Image (cartoon, helix red, strand yellow):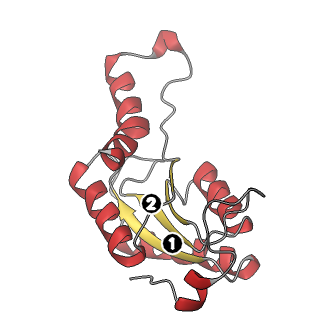
Amino acid sequence: MAFHLTTAQSDSAYFSPYRSDGKLYGFISVVTGATLPIGRAVVFELAAHGAACIYACSPSLDPSNGQSSTPAKFDSDSAALAAEVNKEFPNTKVIGYPLNITSEQETLGLIDDVLNACGRLDVFVCAAGWLGPAGIDRTGPGELQRGWEANGLAPFFALR
């Protein structure tokens, strides 16, 4: 689903992403882990502060069991998030976007889609974090690697 800024949006006095009042009018944003609790809160905060468009990325794995999410579950979760945000903040467009945050190809595809649709990307939030075991004494190299992949790769790929 493509999102394009209208002339009225881009010519508005509120469009500039560089505002001294801290508002985000007109911002184009990406939030990974958008259907998870922290990502969801970030999506609502961005919308509350005036973001024009939020690409709400959801993990391709179900965090509760590590299994692949079904397209129907992704569609349902994304639609529910968009409906809840738009109920309170109708001027913010929420676009559900499936994303494997450890895939460079998928992350670059996301960035291309955002730039092609909107011309820029103002905010990138990686909230698809993975916490791992309850303590350092139970954390091994494999868990550490999974934590790095979940929290560090998507922003790295996006910035490259």
The C terminus appears in which quarter of the rendering? top left
Q: Position of residue 76 (x, y in %)?
A: 50, 75
Out of 154 and 98, give the one closest to the viewer: 154
In the rendered view, tell whether residue 97 sits above or below residue 38: below
Q: Are marks 1 and 2 in contact (CB under 8 Å)?
A: yes
Real-space CA distance between mark 1 and mark 2, rounded to the nearest whole angstrom? 8 Å
Out of 71 and 15, give the one closest to the viewer: 15
In the rendered view, tell whether residue 80 sits above or below residue 104: below
- Indicate the secondary structure of the residue bearing disc 2: strand
Looking at marks 1 and 2 on the same chain, the residue that comes earlier in the sequence is marked by 2
Q: Position of residue 106 (x, y in %)?
A: 26, 58
Q: Position of residue 121 (x, y in %)?
A: 45, 62
| Residue 157 circle label | none
- Indicate the secondary structure of the residue bearing disc 1: helix
The N terminus appears in which quarter of the rendering? bottom left
Residue 18 falls in image quadrant: bottom right
Amino acid type, callout 1 = Ser
Horizontally, residue 27 falls left or right of residue 66, namely right
Horizontally, residue 143 falls left or right of residue 33, namely left
Residue at 66% x, 63% y is 24
Amino acid type, callout 2 = Ser
Out of 90 and 146, give the one closest to the viewer: 90
Residue at 39% x, 36% y is 152
Please name the residue that numbered disc 1 is placed on.
Answer: 78
Q: Position of residue 155 (x, y in %)?
A: 40, 44
Residue at 38% x, 23% y is 144
Out of 66 and 115, give the one closest to the viewer: 115
| Residue 58 circle label | 2
